Image (spheres, helix red, strand yellow):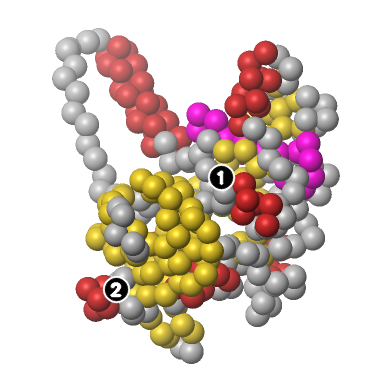
Amino acid sequence: MMRKKACSMFFTVRQEEPANMKRYFFAILFFSFSAAVYSQVTIPDFVKTYGEDGFYFFGHNNRLYECNDWIKKYRDITDLCFLDNNGYLKISYKTGETSYFILKETEYYLLLAPRQYFIMDDNSWIDYYKTQSEPPYGYSNTFIKNSSSTVFLCEDGSEYSADNFSRKFFASDRTFMYNYWFNSPPLAVSADQLGQFEITIDFEHDVEGILFLNGFVDFKRPHLYQNNRRVRELAIADKHGNFSITKFVDDRIQFQEIQFPQMTDGIKIRVQSYFEGNKYTDICISSITPVFSDEMKRKARIFPIDPDYGEILEKIRTGEYTEIK
């Protein structure tokens, strides 16, 4: 999260006995502290199968749940989640009846999305992958035909170009076809380049929107997210001239969905404003991928298919699923 100026709230309180005044003070203090802590963790509404059919995570009303369809039980694991000092969402995972068997009691990074992606990596996997130049099973298909920008940053032999958007996900034999390849650098531009900066992305299919990952997101160098600038406002135009929209995005390490007014096979993007970095003036974008249609999911061989979000809520409402307290 970006650093924000401290805010002060002023209350007009009538004169009371000292004991009553203490109660007012501590009530205000507790409310302010609670709001500051719990408002930071943001969970999108989503559902994602994990490992195999019957085990999945889902988000609802800013809470994170884990469900085991085989035993018809679910549990709320939101209280295990927290934001670290670099703004990354993490979970101090504890196993239970609903757990998939490969998960262990350790600390994981969580990279969430309203659909399509669910990233849950611990330090053992991060240490394993950070020494590899390419993923062992190759890159996953993101259905991007071409991605480029008018300018980009080159530094120490690395190109921080939009071409890296096609090298952000990889398949593994662990749990999921779309794991996050943090070794591929983000798209980055210097402050001097921003005036000439424009991104062009051509998709292999007509798409309804994109999933946008802001900033420099790198599990092995987590400090680089806050150290660099992040996007605050985007101007997105259909490459055929059919629409033009402006969208504000959050300063949050999470995939954010941006819906288009109509389907398109290509867009152009310009950065209108940004959040300041703590150290550097480069503006970074880690990933832009299309929202997958059902046809794209079939081509990507994403199996098993995620359960319907509404059906999960209905099973909870009717008592078919019971909650583990």
Residues 226 and 262: in front is 262
Q: Where are the magenta residues, as a range?
A: 50-63
Q: Specify whether residue 270 is painted magenta.
A: no
Residue at the disc numbered 1 = 115
Question: Residue 185, how many percent across, how many down?
Answer: 51, 74
Query: In screen coordinates, is 149 left or right of 80?
Result: left
Q: Amino acid at mark 1?
A: Arg
Q: Element type at marker 2?
A: loop
Residue 57 shows which numbered tag? none
Query: In screen coordinates, is 252 left or right of 240?
Result: right
Examine the rendered structure and indicate whether residue 46 appears above or below residue 184: above
Question: Residue 13, how many percent across, how many down?
Answer: 19, 17
Q: Element type at marker 1?
A: loop
- Which residue is drawn at the image coordinates 54% and 47% (left, top)? 113
- Which residue is drawn at the image coordinates 83% and 44% (left, top)? 101
Residue 197 shows which numbered tag? 2
Of labels 1 and 2, earlier in sequence is: 1
Examine the rendered structure and indicate whether residue 72 appears above or below residue 203: above
Q: Residue 81's image quarter?
A: top right
Residues 6 and 271: in front is 271
Classify mark 1: residues with Cα within 10 Å, few (<14), some (14-19) or many (20+): some
Q: Specify whether residue 61 is painted magenta.
A: yes
Q: Amino acid at mark 2?
A: Phe
- Which residue is drawn at the image coordinates 29% and 64% (left, top)? 270
Query: In screen coordinates, is 258 left or right of 185?
Result: left
Quadrant location of the C terminus in the rendered image: top right
Question: Residue 195, how many percent across, how many down?
Answer: 22, 73
Residue placed farthest to the bottom in the image?
157
Q: How far apart are labels 1 and 2 at the CA level?
A: 29 Å
Residue 223 seen in this snapshot = no
Question: Residue 12, how many percent across, how many down?
Answer: 16, 20
Classify mark 2: residues with Cα within 10 Å, few (<14), some (14-19) or many (20+): some
